[in-house]
Amino acid sequence: IRATINSDSMETNSWYMRWDGAIRDYHKAISLNPNNALLHFLCGFTYANIGNRALPKDYDPESKRLAEKLGGPLPKEDKDFFYKKAIDQFTAAIKINPRYLEAYDERASVYSRMQNYNKAIADYKSILDIDPEHQHRYVNLGQLYVELKQYDNAEWAFTKALSAKRHFRYPPADILKARAEVYMAKRKYKEALDDCSAAIIMRTASRNTWIDLNGYMSTQDSMLYELRAEIYYELALAK
């Protein structure tokens, strides 16, 4: 409990001290109960959060000091040190419970931040083998395929996301936009235009039902119209 309280604390001037306490308590709990997958997951999640906040060691003496305390020596970047610790803990959780979807998900996210896209893809595929109808994992998979310029695979992933039975966090219009961008990369301009236009219609229909926090909806609408303008331009050139 104390580890979780410290892990959840985000005060700017003490985050590293509280997460240091969280790590020590999680490791103590794990030493007493090493086969508890949840403890490994929470410890890994905390390491990942530290990595997200860490800066290169030359600019962040506090994260450098914490890394050394947790078992240095430091690699070039503090981020990688903490991310590797996170991966170790997520891997331990998966070893205990091979169907621990959240552990696969978080490990894939860390691999992605380290630009180890192939390992992240492997983790998302493991998730989908267990839970083939979870929309956002197809979206994450599609985004990774885009990073690798594997556009056929990206098209497949975004198409699966649109037909997935369990929706989570992505509005269909956002997925259509992502697939339209893939179609653009494949020079399939007609399909790109269809997806982009459908996304604009969805945005227009849902505009009155969403609270536009920080102008998110307006920004997304602008990006859709900009994308469709690019598609029309490419179609004109093709003629």
Image: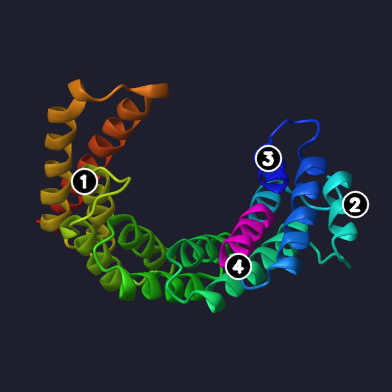
From the image, which quarter does the C terminus lie in? bottom left
Depicted 222 relative to depicted 85: above or below: above
Q: CA distance from mark 1 to mark 4?
A: 37 Å
Q: CA distance from mark 2 to mark 4?
A: 29 Å
> Which residue in the structure is indicated by mark 3?
5
Of the two numbered discs 2 and 4 on the same chain, state the one appearing first in sequence.
4
The three-letter code of the residue at mark 4 reads Asn
- The magenta region covers 36-47
> Which residue in the structure is indicated by mark 2?
65
Quarter of the rendering containing residue 184: bottom left
> Which residue in the structure is indicated by mark 1?
172
Magenta: main secondary structure equals helix
The three-letter code of the residue at mark 2 reads Arg
Of the two numbered discs 3 and 4 on the same chain, state the one appearing first in sequence.
3
Q: CA distance from mark 3 to mark 4?
A: 19 Å
Residue at 19% of width from left, 33% of height from top? Answer: 203
Q: Find residue 22 and report its horizontal and vertical position in percent.
A: 74, 49
